[in-house]
Image (cartoon, helix red, strand yellow):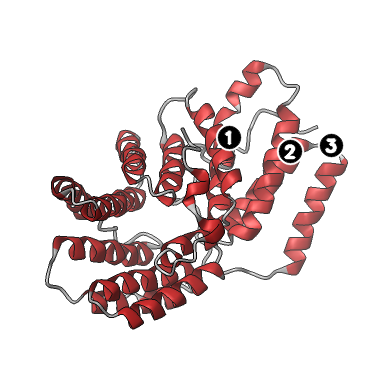
């Protein structure tokens, strides 16, 4: 039976995504012999009833595929890691369970993100509830910020933008208190700005002018803090997302800018990164802009391309945004999950 002492000590439990020090994978390496060897290790651990080793090995694989945004593969390993983890801890004393809490939260956070991207919303909500129960017993860290981030993602998807904004602002607060990396802080500011844009657009649709102004001030503040450091891995993707979110802010502010050209300039970035998720988001933003300009045919073409791209990507959940204007929400309807996180 494996030892309880390390709890996957090759990982920093307060760095749920390994964005600073871990080497970045940029493409899937189809190394069948390596995959077979790792699967053999997993089977050996299971045959020995060594559930802690099984959990560790499965989670290592999950992290690998998560970094590659291959969520459909990562989620299978995450589920296995959590099942093995809970079998291992089922008969352990309370003090051991308490020591293991941060490792479990890290696994639950990762699984929630993966299930969300894969459109498994009932599982996502259940995992978020689990994570919040664990986080309530821990001091605020970058790890608990990940729980807040996932909660904000789900609330935004349900279109409860003010609630999503409160959770996203907690991420910023925790990051500042825990000296998170500059890239993570930039990403968090972008996330807040994006949700503030959503809040402003929703308020504008309701004729709530004062709220629009308030939310746009929040968006501007966080956009001003969101420029990524140029010497960090993946900073080009963050820069691309900055332009996406700025374009919505610019439109809501009524600025006279060529947002079509701004958005089209990101397409080569998505192609260079082989990032279909970013590409789908770009075309969703282009469609929003064409719709604003009254170019209905171009808007529909972009929404259709965006939805097709996202539905065939590793994050089909994001297809909700282009599908909604096409009135094709079907099982993506957030109404199914109204109040689920309360």
Say if 162 sits above or below 319 in the image: above
Q: Position of residue 39 (x, y in %)?
A: 78, 55
Q: Which mark is residue 103?
A: 1
Residues at marks 2 and 1, CA–CA distance in whole angstroms: 13 Å
Looking at the rendering, which quadrant does residue 283 occupy?
A: bottom left
Residue drawn 30% across the image and 48% down it: 192
Residue drawn 35% across the image and 39% down it: 163
Q: Secondary structure at mark 3?
A: loop
Which is more foreground, mark 2 or mark 1?
2
Q: Earlier in the sequence, mark 2 or mark 3?
A: 3
Q: Secondary structure at mark 1?
A: helix
Q: Which mark is residue 49?
A: 3
Q: Secondary structure at mark 2?
A: helix
Quarter of the N terminus within the rendering:
top right
Q: Position of residue 174 (x, y in %)?
A: 34, 35
What is the residue that sits farthest to the bottom in this orientation?
297
Residue drawn 21% across the image and 60% down it: 249
Q: Which mark is residue 84?
A: 2
The answer to whether residue 128 is seen in the rendering is: yes
Q: Position of residue 120 (x, y in %)?
A: 59, 51
Residues at marks 1 and 3, CA–CA distance in whole angstroms: 20 Å
Evaluate if marks 2 and 1 touch, with contact meaning CB atoms under 8 Å apart: no
Which is more foreground, mark 2 or mark 3?
2
Label 3 environment density (alpha carbons within 10 Å; few <14, some 14–19, many ≥20): some
């Amino acid at each position: 039976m494996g030892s309880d002492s390390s709890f996957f000590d090759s990982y920093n439990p307060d760095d749920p995504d390994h964005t600073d020090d871990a080497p970045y994978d940029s493409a899937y390496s189809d190394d069948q012999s390596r995959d077979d060897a790792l699967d053999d290790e997993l089977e050996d651990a299971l045959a020995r009833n060594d559930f802690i080793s099984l959990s560790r090995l499965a989670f290592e694989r999950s992290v690998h595929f998560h970094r590659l945004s291959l969520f459909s593969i990562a989620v299978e390993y995450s589920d296995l890691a959590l099942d093995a983890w809970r079998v291992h801890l089922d008969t352990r004393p309370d003090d051991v369970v308490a020591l293991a809490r941060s490792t479990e939260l890290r696994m639950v956070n990762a699984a929630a993100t993966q299930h969300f991207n894969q459109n498994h919303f009932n599982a996502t909500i259940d995992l978020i509830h689990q994570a919040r129960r664990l986080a309530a017993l821990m001091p605020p860290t970058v790890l608990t910020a990940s729980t807040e981030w996932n909660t904000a993602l789900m609330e935004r998807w349900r279109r409860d933008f003010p609630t999503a904004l409160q959770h996203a602002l907690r991420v910023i607060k925790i990051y500042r208190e825990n000296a998170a990396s500059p890239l993570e802080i930039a990403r968090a500011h972008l996330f807040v700005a994006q949700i503030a844009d959503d809040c402003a657009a929703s308020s504008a649709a309701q004729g709530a002018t004062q709220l629009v102004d308030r939310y746009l001030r929040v968006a501007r503040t966080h956009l001003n803090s969101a420029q990524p450091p140029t010497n960090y891995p993946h900073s080009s993707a963050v820069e691309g997302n900055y332009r996406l979110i700025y374009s919505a802010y610019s439109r809501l502010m009524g600025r006279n800018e060529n947002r079509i050209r701004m958005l089209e300039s990101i397409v080569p970035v998505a192609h260079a990164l082989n990032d279909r998720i970013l590409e789908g988001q770009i075309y969703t933003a282009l469609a929003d802009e064409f719709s604003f300009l009254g170019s209905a045919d171009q808007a529909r073409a972009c929404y259709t391309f965006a939805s097709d791209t996202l539905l065939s990507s590793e994050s089909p959940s994001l297809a909700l945004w282009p599908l909604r204007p096409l009135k094709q929400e079907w099982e993506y309807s957030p109404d199914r999950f109204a109040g689920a996180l309360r």
